[in-house]
């Protein structure tokens, strides 16, 4: 996703042309001589028939997080590393104390593991290697639980939650929660691709350190548009499902001013 693979000898392919040229200069034929087994079956000298496997997916799993832990806490815990996504794991509607953290580069996993048994607040946190499949399975479970997937009480709570959103007054402003830290205004415009938005109508909220908080506010043309846009509630942007809430201009201005 983030990287271009290299050849098995560590090169990037730029040495292939000189190698082929040397072969031609020595009088060898690319296709071999007539009747030789080399003619159609053997690759040219220097050619790598199978590319090396892609680099491992850069994700770690955290265990023992404080129950009031936020994405900002995880980003500060891994200070200096590129945080692409933080996914908190819930069980039965409650935070389990576990999370997955996707990093920018595979090499950063080794640095993240050095934070094993370091503290967030008063809790020491365990850090483990993880896999892409485990991360995506956790995403699927979170989406299923958020939609009231299995337990009856979760379904009734989700229904009440949705009814509250449906009955809320619309002013043309929606609040987005759960955005990836890397989400841009263009990403949000693509998320609402059925609606006419400009960059000026999108406000990504920063925290006190000047980093994305995972929230944003979007101004639509009118209340009818923002209400229609609620059909995108709990749909995914990248690997994250996004929650939408009816909001107001005053709430939006307060959030923007807090991040300044």
Image (cartoon, rainbow, N blue to C red):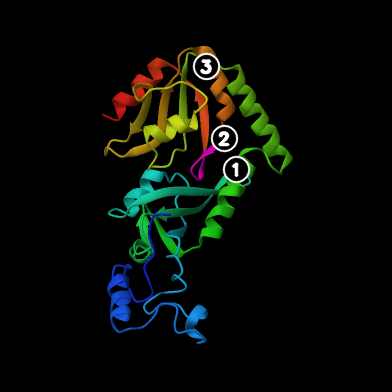
The residue under the point 56% across, 59% down is 133
How crowded is the residue under tag 2: few (<14 C-alpha within 10 Å), some, or many (20+)? some
Specify whether residue 202 is painted magenta: no
Q: Nearer the N terminus, badge 3 or badge 2?
A: 3
The answer to whether the residues at label 2 and label 1 have Cβ atoms under 8 Å apart is yes
- Residue to which mark 2 is pinned: 234
The answer to whether the residues at label 3 and label 2 have Cβ atoms under 8 Å apart is no
What is the spatial separation of the Cα atoms under label 3 and label 2, in whole angstroms? 17 Å
SS label for mark 3: helix
Nearest the viewer among 257 and 119 is: 257
Answer above or below: position of 137 versus 21: above
Q: Which quarter of the figure has residue 173? A: top left
For residue 223, side relative to residue 162 (left or right): left
- Residue to which mark 1 is pinned: 143
The magenta region covers 234-240
SS label for mark 2: loop
Residue 225 is labelled as: 3
SS label for mark 1: helix
């Amino acid at each position: 996703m983030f990287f271009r693979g290299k050849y098995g000898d560590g090169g990037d392919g730029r040495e292939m042309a000189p190698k082929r040229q040397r072969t031609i200069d020595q009088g060898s034929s690319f296709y071999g001589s007539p009747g030789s087994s080399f003619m159609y079956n053997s690759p040219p000298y220097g050619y790598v028939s199978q590319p090396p496997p892609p680099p491992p997916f850069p994700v770690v799993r955290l265990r023992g997080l404080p129950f009031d832990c936020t994405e900002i806490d995880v980003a500060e815990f891994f200070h200096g590393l590129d945080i692409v996504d933080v996914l908190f794991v819930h069980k039965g509607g409650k935070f389990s104390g576990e999370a997955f953290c996707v990093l920018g580069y595979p090499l950063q996993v080794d640095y993240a593991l050095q934070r094993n048994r370091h503290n967030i607040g008063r809790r020491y946190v365990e850090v483990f290697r993880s896999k892409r499949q485990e991360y995506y399975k956790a995403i699927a479970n979170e989406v299923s639980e958020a939609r009231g997937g299995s337990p009856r009480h979760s379904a009734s709570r989700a229904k009440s939650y949705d009814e509250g959103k449906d009955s809320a007054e619309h002013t043309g402003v929606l609040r987005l929660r759960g955005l990836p830290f890397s989400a841009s205004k263009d990403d949000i415009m693509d998320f609402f691709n059925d609606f006419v938005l400009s960059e000026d109508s999108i406000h990504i909220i920063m925290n006190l350190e000047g980093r994305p908080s995972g929230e944003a506010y979007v101004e639509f043309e009118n209340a009818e548009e923002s209400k229609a846009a609620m059909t995108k509630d709990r749909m995914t942007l990248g690997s994250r499902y996004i929650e939408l809430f009816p909001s107001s201009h005053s709430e939006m201005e307060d959030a923007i001013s807090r991040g300044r």
